Image: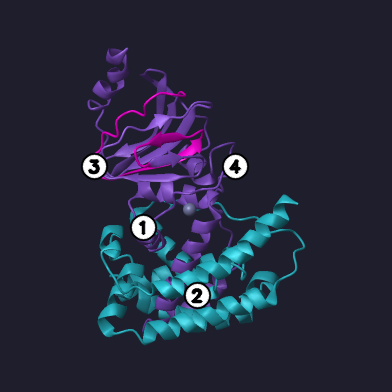
Chain colours: A cyan, B purple
Amino acid sequence: MIAVRDNRDRNAFAALFDHFAPRLKGFIIRSGASAHQAEEIVQDVMLTIWRKAAMFDPHRAQVSAWIYQIARNRQIDIARKENRPMPEELKEEPGMEPDASQILALEQEAGQLKQALATLKPEQREIVEKAYLGELTHQEISAQTGLPLGTIKSRIRLGLERLRHELKDLKQ
Amino acid sequence: MSAITHHIPDAMLAAYAAGNLPHAFAVAVASHVSLCAECRVALGAHQAIGGAVLENTGAVAVSSSLKDDILAQLDAPFTPEPVYERNGIFPGPVTEAMKGRAPRWKKLGMGVRQDILSADANGSVRLLYIPPGQAVPDHSHNGLELTLVLQGSFSDETGRFGVGDLEIADEDLEHTPVADPGEACICLAATDARLNFRALVPRLLQPLFRI
Ligand SMILES: [Zn+2]
């Protein structure tokens, strides 16, 4: 992803396609699209990834998390023909050195989350999948117990430390 | 700026990440996240879980021509989406809802003003301007209302809400928010039900009769 962002590397983008396109297609079909529609959306999502690559910040998001959000946004924008309201982008400090340990920690955590999800009981996993495929309203989600909240919390702490650090840098 | 103490509930943030919040609420949530480091990080956590769901989804083979089709389009010209920047007290998602224009205040009486940014059967988004010491107009809604403070503050039976704080009120909440002394209070109010204007009037007249 970094090679796509910084070097506009087409081979790296092709590798990203090989990994994510079939998953995206499965994901989009699960949320109700036909195979044909799904491919059109996959195409749209992959092109959005290429065009918005400059906005990817590995300190703040895992590749899979970033692509997940793009996929959901594009699905909704196409279905409702309107742009989803998005938070302001944080401006990265120019010339800030990448923090390799932070990036690694985030990606390791993505691996752990994936593991944790795979080991959930089938009915729990079903709920998590439904929630993040946009099949549950916020009232329905808040009525659910058993979402992996502990994992969320640790991620929150990790990310907050970094963000506080950044905000402090910006003020100086 | 005082610290934000009223945040977005986890379930609402998850529904926002999944794209399953009514548009009006999504404007309020995106605006709060623009102002709140804590909720930005929490949103990142939900996106990470979404990413894990994506990774675990069974892959479905794509047609053989799809990759080449996409690679062939990488250099095609495209129009980037407009980026709405923060403008004074208004965070980016609010300036987007305002379509980049200045507020167009309409008088509601008692010095209270509003600017309806969008309204239909699925909900409404509006700005409210409440002079110091004045009661906030009745939350005449049938569903849920999210109120995000952009300037000043207000207090009600449940607490004090300053800049960045988000109040979530359902129809069962009986409360009388009053703008605090000092600066006028400007809020973004989002509901998931049709606005009911008639119900707005009696509440606004209440202070008159009390005088
Ligand atoms: Zn918050």
- Kindly report which numbered mark, 3 or 4, lies closer to the viewer in this rendering: 4
Classify residue A61 as left or right of residue B58.
right
Query: Mark 1 or mark 3, which is nearer to you?
Result: 3
**For residue A64, which numbered disc appears in the image?**
2
Visible in this render: residue A21?
Answer: yes
- The 10 Å Cα crowd at callout 2, few under 14, some 14 to 19, many 20 or more, is many
Tell if the residue under mark 3 belongs to the same chain as the one under mark 2.
no
Three-letter residue code for mark 1:
Met
Q: In which quarter of the image is the C terminus of chain B?
A: top left
Q: Is residue A141 left or right of residue A103?
A: left
Q: Name the residue tied to disc 1.
A: B12
**Residue flagged by tag 4: what amino acid is it?**
Met
Q: How far apart are marks 2 and 1 (CA)?
A: 21 Å
Quadrant in which the N terminus of chain B appears: top right
Quarter of the rendering containing residue A143: bottom left
Classify B41 as above or below B134.
below
Say whether marks 1 and 3 touch (CB < 8 Å): no
Beta carbon at label 3 within 8 Å of ligand 1: no
Q: Residue at image x 54%, y 45%? A: B92
Residue picked out by circle 3: B171
Contact (Cβ within 8 Å) of mark 4 with mark 2 = no
Earlier-in-chain disc, 3 versus 4: 4
Subunit ID for the residue under disc 2: A
Chain of the residue on which disc 4 is drawn: B
The percent position of residue A117, horizontal first and vertical second, equals 38, 82
Q: Nearer the viewer, mark 4 or mark 2?
A: 4
Q: Residues within 10 Å of mark 3 (few under 14, many from 20)?
A: few
